[in-house]
Image (cartoon, rainbow, N blue to C red):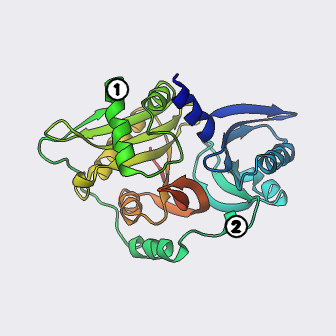
C-alpha cells in the first residue's frame, strides 16, 4: 500500500474488533468524519461498551457515536445518553437494529439544512413504487466491477464528490474493499466510458447489506442509471439469500431519496450530521427494504 493510501485510511478509519468483559464490537474510528461507528456488536455488557465508546470519543475530540443497536438493548443505550434516530428491520436476522446516536457536543446534534430535507421527504411521501423494470439506454452495459475498472471508478467518484466519508477516490482502497465484502456495480456507455457506479456493502453472516457509493457522471444523470444499478445489485444479493437491505442517503438529495422510495424502500429516520460528504457534515436519511 502506498504512503498516500495509508494516510487516507488512517484519516477515514478502518473497521476493527474491540473486546472487553462480556462484549465485542466491530468499530471504526474516523478522524475525517469526527465520529465512532459501531457496525455490529456481541455480548450482554452493553453498559461497559457504551462507556468505553463515550470515553474514547471524548479523548479523540469526536462529535458523534452511532451504533446499530439491537432492539432489546435500546433502553440500555438510552440510559447511557444515546438517542434513537432510525431503524433497520431484520439487521440482526431475527431482530431489528435501532440507530442509537450519542452527541459529544451540542453543535454536532443540530440539523443540517432541516427545512430542505423535510421538504424533500414531503414531496416524495406519496410516490408509488415503480412496477416497471428499469431499462438501460441503447448501447449501455452493466457489469460487476473487476480490478481493471478501479482507476475509472476512482476518477468518477472524484468528479462527482467534493468529499466522501470513505476514501473512494483511491483505487487501492477500492481494491481492498472488493477483496473484502463490497460488491460494485458499474454502467458503461456506448463509448465504453464509465458513467455510473454503486456498491453493496455486505455482511455475509447476518445477511444484510448497505446499498451505497452511488455516483453518476453529470452528462448521464436523469436517465435511470441509479435505479438500474440498484435493481441489479438487489438481484445479485437475492441470489445470495440476503434479506435486510438499507441505504444512508443525503437528506438534501431529492434524486437519491426518490430512487429508493420508488424502489420500494421505507424511510425510517434521519441521522443528524452523520458524515462528511460534499465538503461538509450532513444529515443522512435511512431507507430500508426486506427482500425474500
Residue 13: image quadrant is top right
Horizontal side of 71 relative to 279 (left or right) equals right
Q: Is residue 47 above or below residue 5?
A: below
**Residue contact at pointers 2 and 1, CB within 8 angstroms:** no
Depth check, front residue: 4 or 148: 4
Where residue 136 appears, as percent x and y from the top left, is 19, 47
| Residue at 52%, 30% in the rendered image | 4
Where, quadrant-wise, is the C terminus in this rendering?
Answer: top left
| Residue at 25%, 59% in the rendered image | 222
Q: Is residue 41 visible?
A: yes
* Residue that sits furthest to the front in the current view: 3
Which is more foreground, mark 2 or mark 1? Answer: 2
| Residue at 49%, 71% in the rendered image | 117
Q: Which mark is residue 73?
A: none
Where residue 287 appears, as percent x and y from the top left, is 49, 57
Where residue 111 appears, as percent x and y from the top left, is 61, 69
Q: Is residue 135 above or below residue 239?
A: below
Estimate how packed mark 2 is, as few (under 14), some (14 to 19) or many (20 or more) residues with alpha carbons within 10 Å. Answer: few
Disc 2/disc 1 C-alpha distance (Å): 42 Å
Depth check, front residue: 231 or 167: 167
Name the residue tied to disc 2: 107
- Say which label, 2 or 1, has the lower sequence index: 2
Depth check, front residue: 197 or 58: 58
* Residue that sits furthest to the top in the current view: 1
Estimate how packed mark 1 is, as few (under 14), some (14 to 19) or many (20 or more) residues with alpha carbons within 10 Å. Answer: few
| Residue at 21%, 38% in the rendered image | 193
Name the residue tied to disc 1: 146
Horizontal side of 249 relative to 38 (left or right) equals left
Amino acid at each position: 500500500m502506498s504512503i498516500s493510501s495509508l494516510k487516507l485510511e488512517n484519516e477515514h478509519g478502518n473497521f476493527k474488533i474491540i473486546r472487553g468483559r462480556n462484549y465485542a464490537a466491530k468499530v471504526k474510528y474516523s478522524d475525517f468524519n469526527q465520529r465512532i461507528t459501531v457496525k455490529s456488536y456481541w455480548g450482554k455488557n452493553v453498559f461497559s461498551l457504551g462507556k468505553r465508546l463515550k470515553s474514547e470519543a471524548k479523548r479523540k475530540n469526536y462529535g458523534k457515536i452511532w451504533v446499530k443497536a439491537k432492539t432489546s438493548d435500546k433502553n440500555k443505550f438510552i440510559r447511557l445518553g444515546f438517542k434513537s434516530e432510525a431503524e433497520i428491520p431484520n439487521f440482526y436476522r431475527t431482530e431489528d437494529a435501532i440507530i442509537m446516536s450519542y452527541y459529544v457536543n451540542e453543535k454536532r446534534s443540530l440539523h443540517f439544512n432541516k427545512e430542505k430535507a423535510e421538504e424533500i421527504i414531503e414531496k416524495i411521501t406519496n410516490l408509488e413504487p415503480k412496477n416497471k423494470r428499469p431499462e438501460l439506454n441503447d448501447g449501455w452495459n452493466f457489469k460487476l466491477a473487476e480490478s481493471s475498472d478501479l482507476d475509472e471508478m476512482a476518477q468518477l467518484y472524484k468528479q462527482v464528490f467534493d468529499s466522501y466519508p470513505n476514501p473512494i477516490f483511491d483505487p487501492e482502497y477500492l481494491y481492498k474493499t472488493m477483496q473484502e465484502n463490497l460488491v460494485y456495480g458499474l454502467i458503461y456507455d456506448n463509448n465504453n466510458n464509465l458513467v455510473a457506479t454503486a456498491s453493496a456493502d455486505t455482511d455475509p453472516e447476518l445477511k444484510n447489506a448497505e446499498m451505497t457509493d452511488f455516483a453518476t457522471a453529470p452528462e448521464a444523470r436523469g436517465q435511470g442509471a441509479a435505479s438500474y444499478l440498484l435493481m441489479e445489485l438487489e438481484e445479485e444479493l437475492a441470489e445470495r439469500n440476503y434479506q435486510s437491505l438499507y441505504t444512508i442517503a443525503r437528506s438534501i438529495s431529492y434524486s437519491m431519496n426518490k430512487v429508493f422510495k420508488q424502489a420500494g424502500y421505507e424511510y425510517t429516520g434521519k441521522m443528524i450530521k452523520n458524515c462528511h460528504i460534499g465538503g461538509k457534515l450532513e444529515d443522512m436519511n435511512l431507507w430500508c427494504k426486506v427482500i425474500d
